[in-house]
Amino acid sequence: MATFLLEVGTEELPASFVSDALHQWQTRIPAELDELALSPEAVHFYGTPRRLAVVLDGLPPRQPDRREEVKGPPAQAAFKAGQPTQAALGFAKSRGVEVTALEVRDTDKGAFVFVNQDIPGRAAPDILIELIPQWILGLEGKRFMRWGDGDLRFPRPIRWLVALLDGEVLPLTLENGSTVCVSDRLSEGHRVLHPAPVPLRRAQDYVEALRSAYVEIDPAARRLLIERQVKEAAKSLGGVPMISPALLNEVTNLVEWPTAVVGKFDTGFLELPPEVAIIEMESHQRYFPLRQSADGLTLMPYFVTISNGDPSKQAIIAEGNARVIRARLSDGKFFFDADRAQPLDAFVAKLETVTFEEQLGSMAAKVKRIGAIADHLCDQLNLAAQPRQHIRRAAYLCKADLVTQMVGEFPELQGVMGQKYALHSGEPEAVATAIFEHYLPRGAQDRLPQTLVGQVVGIADRLDTLVGIFSTGQLPKGSSDPFALRRAANAVLNILWSAELPLNLARLLDTIVCDFAQDEALQVNAPEALRTQLQDFFLQRVQTLLQDELGIDYDLVNAVLGDRALSDPLDVKDRALFLQNMRHSGRMDKVYETVNRATRLAAQGTLDTQVLEPDGVVTAAALESRSERAFLAALQTLLPQTQAAQASRNYDQLVAGLEQVAPVVNNFFDGPDSVLVMADDPTVRQNRLNLLGLLRNHALVLGDFGAIVKG
């Protein structure tokens, strides 16, 4: 077994490409080697800003020999009168064998010609020489470039190649016009700390040889080293570092030999909102901010930056970084002071200059629609005067900070600055909080809005976006969702479920679509089709959330996805969870067979699924057996339990009633007094189908048992 090293040396790569490229290699290289029966015992992937590398440990010297059976043309076409035809001759030639080596065998599709071949395994170096250019040039990413006079494309110019099989150089060549990059055993060390080439005697020496040249080649080790240094630096100052995982990952791929450097800025900048200082340090400078405690946002006038330079120059590096952040924070203070020179509502008029979407008008028009939708929400929720007032004010101001200088410079602070400017302008705290919260959740791991005002405005904002974008025909397709409509719909449902807001979403969508259709500026055509598209879209989101986020079995989700799913979103979630608990507790088994059998047979009748009362649908005089009369009596007993379950959403009562009915129905089907449901007499037949239909309808209050698969 051998060890093979491939290193692709480059100019400084974008940090995001390093991790993306290694992920692509992790997916591709082991799979291709497995397919070629050349699987190594272990595969290691390494990367820094100046190189991508893979080390294959325990690589077989060659593929194993194999015997391959190859199927050829049908026997009738291959041989005529016992003589080989051109088809047989051509097949033999293509496989490199004599015609006499061909065999005729019977298959389930007739007789065919076969040949068995012993194929010797190829040497590992020969295979690697073919694969490696594909591994390098097959990488995908953004903003690839050409350099020199060639057509080769890569994120940055390729400067060297190392290809070692144990101690032997594997001959590789990458041609880029007049520039030719030939593989060697020479790597490169740290650009500053070890500018001389690093000769590699064997592939096994790679990691330690690079470390001796001040390059930590392993991203995981580099990440841990950075994290430890940042924490130690913060501890020395009595602070707690803010280590964003995204920033840590980025910085890991920006350096080869990390050194933590502590910098300082003027304490006067601590008067800025901490979010401003944090975003200045993290997003613009890749600094780690320090705060006074782990459970607060009070910053210290220090930061930690990760240097890729000479550790002996830390003081100079710290001073240079301090000058940069001082200028950045000065800009932030200027924006902050300028924005606060006028009240937040003064910015609302400027929203006319910001386009929300070409066909949907300005952001000012969107704000007006958000207010109208928020009013509809207030009506459905039957809110009192004060929360209505706060909701209207928050809806009016929710986008005002988009035209402030601070948010213009840092779009990530939308909502954050709106809240702070609202408080500075004397707005009620409920309004200011809602301006921030209506954007929540911003990401998959973010919290949901906690206040009623924030919840209502957040739902109204997203519903305006959903109805508006759908009205323009720009629906999500496959993985393409440029307006994040799936995320918006998910947020609406999650807010409703979390806050337990009793909204009729179907009726609310109808109302909003009508408002859009009546707005001449929007030119909405076919409102009925738009309404159907939106309802189908939300049903898909309900299904996805119940299955993927709550872990409900797919058939139980299908059982509750009826007409009530959007008219009562809270109830559809409760019923899905209840059915899941029924299945896990074994309670489902007590009623499943009975209700499911009744549901299947009731489909042959004509009883409306909304009917629960037997009066008027079951003719007592036409009941011929004791089992039928017992069935009717059981349904009459079940009725108040079902009605109570509908009113209270306590489905235990309904299931308890179904459990009591089950033996009676089983006797109706299979007991001593069993009956033939599909009787010849149409009145008797209809009576029996209606009994079954009533049982089905009672069960439908919980879910469609016909959609449930027996466990």
Image: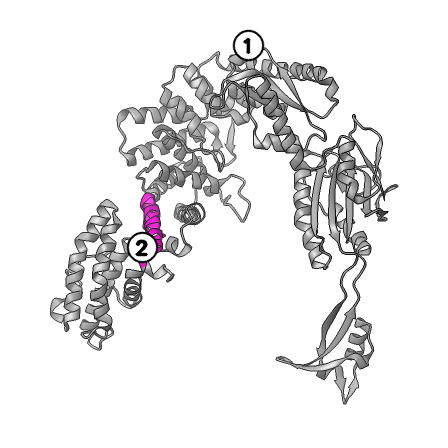
The disc at residue 703 is 2
> How far from the left and from the top, in percent, is residue 394?
38, 25
Q: Visible in this render: residue 683?
A: yes
Q: Quadrant of residue 637?
A: bottom left
Quadrant in which the C terminus is drawn: bottom left
User: Residue 343 falls in which quadrant of the image?
Assistant: top left
Q: Secondary structure at mark 2?
A: loop
> Which residue corresponds to the image point at 82% horizontal and 56% vertical from the top-left?
126
The amino acid type of the residue labelled 2 equals Gly
* Cα distance in 3D space between marks 2 and 1: 62 Å
- The mark found on residue 268 in the picture is 1
Horizontal side, residue 440 vs residue 559: left or right: right
Q: Quadrant of residue 47?
A: top right
Numbered range of the magenta stretch? 560-588
Name the residue nearer the viewer: 77 or 352: 77
Residue type, numbered disc 1: Gly
Between circles 2 and 1, the one closer to the viewer is 1
SS under mark 1: helix
Up/down of 549 relative to 237, above or below: below
